[in-house]
């Protein structure tokens, strides 16, 4: 024991770090801040360390070359002992890191911790969030599969819309005119050197400020932050009702960090690594690219925005959001901290959470994507063919073969891009059906050039049978009056 | 304190000289940094600089015209003209060739004009459909429905001695200069 302490002394004489470390560890924190609500920051740091370690391990095998990356991932998954587990840890660690960083940010926002004097801590935190998202996206590229390839294409398409410099940005992003070897190498450098380096610097800065300025005290409704008095009040509080960070507060951080690591390991063990999906060969077009979980909301947004709004929303939206986050501590740097007296803050969080949640949920079943194989894979359910005439059955065939099912569901099978047609005859009259099929409209392509008159007649005859039993198909009452019953027999009877 | 003035006076003189040298040193480093920045920035922007004008575009053969029957739209692949050894399969690109009649072709990029996903051709309904966000195009590449703001991207083509070639080499994106070029030149929309 004496030997160890002598060695320790020898080092400290030269490093002179023991005193500042002890001071940092034992700095007083407000007793009520030693709460389970204050564990997310340290958990994010813990996951970051896990990501660095597992990232270095993966780099021992991974080859950042467009020609070899996919094969090296297969080797990691199948050939290298426990390679799959390290990949799974890194992949799940990434998901957990985004989640924990977002939770940490929400907590900081709701507890008013971004207010004076911690504005800069918040701003550095905003950059840390952006870098975390940058790591998540560039990490998805490292998994160089079809999703990565087409995901890069989406990134390029979005960047190309920037006025004037768009095309140059695309070439800078891709490292050339197309998504190829240089693109992967470039994203590897970003994912492995550039952002992690910045992350380490910014995390250090973030932590340094937490130590220097002290952890945010538990917000009490009515205790307002004032620039003139806050610092002395805080000092008073930690003196009167403070406790050393080690061990009073840190044990909760330690437990939570351990729990999170355990959860990541459990997910990794149970669910395994992410992909890679198909080979990143752009000649294989039978693919349905989808982004990773944390970008699904964006995928939904890009489908649902009206075309004319898309480019402005894509280019201006992020700038507005980032500016709002950066300006927040300057716009409300003082005043009430407690969420109990900040209803708009609480509503903002709820609104953002519900919006992102809804978009993510929508993206999971992607109702806007045509169901590419429905026409060959999902036959028309039998109940729609009972008691139909030869013409109507011919129409059902046209309906199937012309890929109507890719966008329209019948009996819940088929695409959801267009409306379900189970009872379309109730909604549209005979003439309206013909018009809709031939001219399209309301986001439906026009089929006039692709259907012969006979096919249209048969198709509409079939569509006229799609109504619930006991509910008559829609009729044009004026025509009934003018023409009697004759025209109901079919278009051939029309004058 | 009283005996200081002379010493501090001489100190000031030394400091002024030293601070002058320090400033000179900073200036020197600034000049060196600026000189080094030129090649560094040149390297960083090399992919942009080379692409100015039509730097990346060249004519690529798709093979004999006879392999594209009249009235049909077929998938074919070509190798991107700029290849690096580390590119692997990513330089192989697909495109849709629509042979209308005689020398009349439409050669569409595989990339949806919305966000670049690969569109698929459905001959039965005569539509191109995109699996990502539901963009749909007619057989002539015109926008039919969904989020795209324009029709499919087209490659300029030429026919020499029965061989059809396209001018390719860049990823077609909505903002690219080549995209605007092909949209104007559409032979029969």
Image: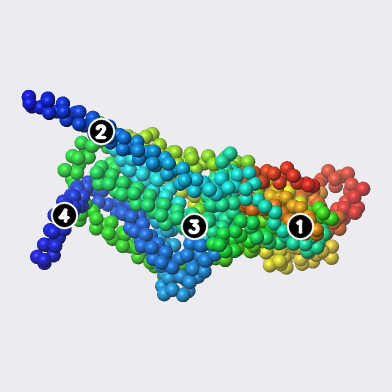
Q: CA distance from mark 3 to mark 2?
A: 45 Å
For the residues bearing labels 3 and 2, Cβ distance under 8 angstroms: no
Q: CA distance from mark 2 to mark 4?
A: 32 Å
Q: Position of residue A319 (x, y in %)?
A: 49, 40
Residue that label 1 marks: B164
Q: Residue at x 46, y 43 (%)?
A: B38
Q: Can you identify the residue that label 4 sits on?
A: A14
Looking at the picture, the colour scheme in use is: rainbow
Which is more toward the observer, A388 or A231?
Answer: A231
For marks 1 and 3, give the CA distance.
34 Å
Say if mark 1 contacts mark 4, CB within 8 Å.
no
Of badges 1 and 2, nearer the viewer stands 2
- C-alpha separation, residue under disc 3 versus residue under disc 4: 42 Å
Q: Residues within 10 Å of mark 2 (few under 14, many from 20)?
A: few
Could one spot residue A415 in this view of the protein? no
2 vs 4, front mark = 2
Query: Could you say which disc has been placed on residue B19 in the image?
Result: 2
Dot 1: chain letter: B
Compared across the picture, whether A43 is left or right of B83 comes to left
Real-space Cα separation, disc 1 to disc 4, in angstroms: 75 Å
Can you say which quadrant of the picture contains the N terminus of chain A?
bottom left
From the image, tell me which residue sits under label 3.
Answer: A185
Instruction: Looking at the image, tell me whether mark 1 or mark 2 is earlier in sequence order.
Output: 2
């Amino acid at each position: 024991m004496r030997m160890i302490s002598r060695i320790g002394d020898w080092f400290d004489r030269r490093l002179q770090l023991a005193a500042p470390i002890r001071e940092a560890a034992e700095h007083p924190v407000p007793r009520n801040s030693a709460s389970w609500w204050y564990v997310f920051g340290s958990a994010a740091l813990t996951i970051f360390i896990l990501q660095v370690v597992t990232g270095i391990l993966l780099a021992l095998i991974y080859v950042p070359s467009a020609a070899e990356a996919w094969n090296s991932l297969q080797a990691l998954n199948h050939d290298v002992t426990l390679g799959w587990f390290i990949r799974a840890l890194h992949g799940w660690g990434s998901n957990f890191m985004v989640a924990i960083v977002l939770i940490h940010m929400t907590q900081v926002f709701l507890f008013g911790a971004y207010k004076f004097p911690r504005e800069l801590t918040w701003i550095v935190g905003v950059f840390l969030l952006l870098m975390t998202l940058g790591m998540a996206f560039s990490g998805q590229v490292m998994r160089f599969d079809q999703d990565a390839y087409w995901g890069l294409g989406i990134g390029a398409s979005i960047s190309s819309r920037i006025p004037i410099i768009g095309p140059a940005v695309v070439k800078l992003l891709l490292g050339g005119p197309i998504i190829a070897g240089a693109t992967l190498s470039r994203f590897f450098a970003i994912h492995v050197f550039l952002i992690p380096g910045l992350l380490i610097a910014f995390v250090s800065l973030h932590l340094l400020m937490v130590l220097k300025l002290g952890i945010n005290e538990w917000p009490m409704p009515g205790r307002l932050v004032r620039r003139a008095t806050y610092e002395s009040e805080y000092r008073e509080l930690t003196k009167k009702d403070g406790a050393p960070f080690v061990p009073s507060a840190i044990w909760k951080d330690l437990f939570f960090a351990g729990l999170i690591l355990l959860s990541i390991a459990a997910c990794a063990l149970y669910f395994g690594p992410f992909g890679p999906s198909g080979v990143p060969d752009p000649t294989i077009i039978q693919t349905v690219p989808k982004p990773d979980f944390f970008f699904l909301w964006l995928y939904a947004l890009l489908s649902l925005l009206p075309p004319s709004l898309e480019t402005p929303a894509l280019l201006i939206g992020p700038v507005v959001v980032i500016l709002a986050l950066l300006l927040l501590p300057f716009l409300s740097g003082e005043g009430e901290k407690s969420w109990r007296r900040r209803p708009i803050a609480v509503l903002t969080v709820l609104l953002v959470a519900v919006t992102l949640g809804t978009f993510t949920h929508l993206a999971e079943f992607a109702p806007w994507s045509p169901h590419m194989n429905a026409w060959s894979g999902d036959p028309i359910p039998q109940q729609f063919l009972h008691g139909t005439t030869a013409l109507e059955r011919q129409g059902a065939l046209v309906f199937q073969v012309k890929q109507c099912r890719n966008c329209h569901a019948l009996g819940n099978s088929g695409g959801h891009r267009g409306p379900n047609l189970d009872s379309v005859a109730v909604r549209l009259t005979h003439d309206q059906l013909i018009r809709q099929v031939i001219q399209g409209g309301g986001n439906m392509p026009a089929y006039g050039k692709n259907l012969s008159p006979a096919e249209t007649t048969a198709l509409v005859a079939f569509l006229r049978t799609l109504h619930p039993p006991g509910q008559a198909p829609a009729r044009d009452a004026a025509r009934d009056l003018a023409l009697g019953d004759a025209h109901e027999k079919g278009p051939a009877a029309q004058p | 304190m009283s005996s200081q003035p002379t010493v501090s006076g001489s100190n000031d003189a030394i400091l002024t000289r030293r601070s002058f040298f320090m400033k000179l040193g900073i200036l020197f480093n600034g000049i060196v940094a600026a000189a080094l920045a030129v090649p560094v920035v040149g390297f960083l922007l090399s992919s942009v600089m080379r692409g100015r004008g039509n730097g990346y575009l060249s004519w690529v053969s798709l093979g004999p015209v006879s392999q594209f029957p009249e009235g049909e739209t077929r998938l074919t692949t070509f190798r991107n003209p700029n290849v690096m050894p580390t590119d692997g399969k990513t330089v192989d690109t697909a495109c849709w060739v629509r042979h209308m009649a005689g020398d009349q072709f439409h050669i569409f990029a595989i990339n949806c004009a919305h966000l670049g996903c690969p569109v698929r051709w459905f001959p039965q309904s005569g539509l191109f459909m995109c699996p990502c966000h539901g963009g749909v195009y007619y057989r002539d590449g015109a926008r039919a429905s969904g989020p795209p703001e324009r029709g499919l991207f087209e490659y300029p083509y030429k026919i020499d001695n029965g061989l059809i070639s396209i001018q390719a080499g860049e990823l077609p994106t909505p903002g690219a200069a080549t995209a605007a070029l092909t949209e104007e030149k559409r032979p029969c929309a």
